[in-house]
């Protein structure tokens, strides 16, 4: 639960991550957290936590799409490299100190 105190996760995220009810997480905060010792009342707007989760899910989708595009480019490069070697005898993957083709 130190993740909550460091601001890494919201109550909603912790409850999902550890499969706990949000009430259990709040009880832990009031019992053991440094917030309780400082006299803070913890109130987290459910919408804000949900918004943060949605933003993170959207970011994951964006990163997955970017990764998929990079994988397609890599696959394409590997096919081009193989074809260049097979058809024209050009090894594109050789080091830069190789002789240029004629």
Image (spheres, grey):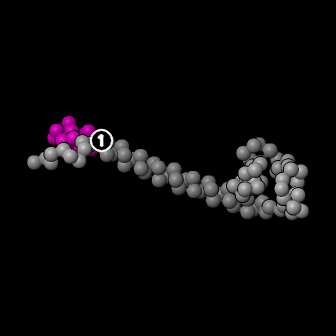
- In the drawing, does residue 71 fall left or right of residue 50? left
Residue positioned 36% across, 43% down in the render: 75
Residue positioned 18% across, 42% down in the render: 90
Look at mark 1 in the image and give the residue it sits on: 79
Is residue 50 a member of the stretch shown in magenta? no
Q: Main secondary structure of the magenta part?
A: helix
Residue 12 visible in the current orientation: no
Instruction: Classify 60 as above or below 92.
Output: below
- Part of the protein shown in magenta: 79-92
Instruction: Classify 81 as above or below 3.
Output: above
Q: In terms of image quadrants, where is residue 36?
A: bottom right
- The picture places residue 38, in percent across and down from the top left corner, at 87, 61
Of the pair 27 and 57, the residue shown nearer to us: 27
Is residue 87 a member of the stretch shown in magenta? yes
Instruction: Classify 97 as above or below 6.
Output: above
- In the drawing, does residue 60 fall left or right of residue 75? right
Residue positioned 83% across, 62% down in the render: 43
Residue positioned 72% across, 58% down in the render: 7
Tell me the SS state at disc 1: helix
Residue 97 visible in the current orientation: yes
Of the pair 42 and 62, the residue shown nearer to us: 42
- The picture places residue 68, in percent across and down from the top left corner, at 45, 48
- The picture places residue 89, in percent across and down from the top left corner, at 16, 38
- The picture places residue 30, in percent across and down from the top left corner, at 88, 54
Instruction: Classify 32 as above or below 38.
Output: above
């Amino acid at each position: 639960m130190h993740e909550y105190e460091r601001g890494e996760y919201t109550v909603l995220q912790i409850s999902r991550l550890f499969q706990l009810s949000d009430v259990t997480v709040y009880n832990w905060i009031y019992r053991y957290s440094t917030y309780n010792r400082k006299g803070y009342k913890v109130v987290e707007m459910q919408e804000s936590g949900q918004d943060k989760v949605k933003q993170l899910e959207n970011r994951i989708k964006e990163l997955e799409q970017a990764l998929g595009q990079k994988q397609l480019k890599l696959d394409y490069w590997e096919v081009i490299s193989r074809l260049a070697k097979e058809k024209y005898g050009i090894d594109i993957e050789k080091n830069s100190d190789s002789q240029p083709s004629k």
